[in-house]
Amino acid sequence: MKINLSILLFLITGFCLAQSNQFIYEYKFKIDSLNRDQSDSENMVLQTTPKGSKFYSQVKQEYDSMMTATFKNAKATQQTHFDFTNLKQSKVSTEVIKTYPDYKRTLKRSISSNRLLIINDQKLNWKISKEKSKVLGYDVQKATTTFHGRTWNVWFAPEIPIQDGPHELCGLPGLIVKAEDSKGDHQFMLIGTKKVVVDSDEILNKKNREIAVTEDKFKKLWADYKKDPAKDMRQISASSDISAPVSVSMTIDGKKYSQDDMLKLVEKERREELQKKNNFLELDLYK
């Protein structure tokens, strides 16, 4: 009986977990079109599974895990002060989920506190060139496509039989190891790979608070946000004051802020960010 139970447990676990390829890309981007001499970078992960893939920021994953644990502990202990001095924030919040074998793409984007999903099942129209080269030791071939208002030049490696790549780029006969838009504002370069064991369903899972919207709805929400970027924070603060009139404070970079101070700081930072961030990867969504 012990042997049979062990075999059963192994089989059940096998259905839930699978060996996965994890591809690490360095993402370089120029978010301010008026200052193209300045650029930022962040490491991104393409996590592939037999059912699909997820593309996300390494830093954001660590940030989200820490925030979740912090607020879960606060709820249990009735904590009212939070110290985020040593918490590193990501520069990239976007996530992309693709399902196999149809390669339907779900772009996850946030506008203030709204977590939004833009689903696209149209295949990318690729033009494969005869031009070949080598990237990171791989024999690669060039291809081009246009989506979200940008023209992309990519290099894919047929020897890696995965029809996927960074962000929403996919559908070529080989992994995309390098991609750059025609203006040189956004670039992805494969810098590492490894094998990991993951839960496919968990990787492709969509959260309950995420809302599916059309591209037109997203553009409307973005236009409203630009007019009043701190509206959601004021609403949250007002509702929390009614339900639980407890003074909450936070420490950021060694400085302590009251709840009112935080509201003013958030509004100031969001308005400044709107001035500097105008060269989004999904260019046509923010026009």
Image (tube, rainbow, N blue to C red):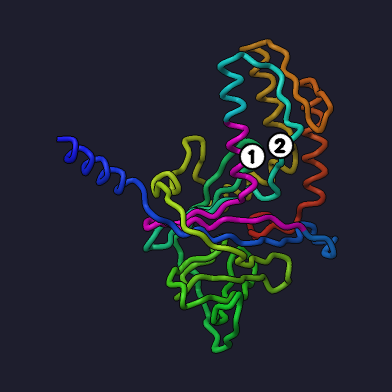
Residue on which the image places disc 2: 87
Tell me, yes or no, whether the highlighted magenta stretch contains residue 232. Answer: no
Residue 243: % across, % down? 61, 12
Left or right of 123? Residue 216 is right
Residue that numbered label 1 is attached to: 63
280 sits to left or right of 3 = right
The amino acid type found where label 1 is placed reads Tyr
Q: Earlier in the sequence, mark 1 or mark 2?
A: 1
Where disc 2 sits, the SS reads loop
Which range is magenta? 40-68
Instruction: State yes or no: discs 1 and 2 in contact (Cβ < 8 Å).
Output: yes
Q: Quadrant of residue 35?
A: bottom right
Q: Which quadrant would residue 133 be assigned to in this image?
A: bottom right
User: In which quadrant of the rendered image does the C terminus lie?
Assistant: bottom right
- Mark 1 burial class by Cα count in 10 Å: few <14, some 14-19, many 20+: some
Q: Secondary structure at mark 1?
A: helix
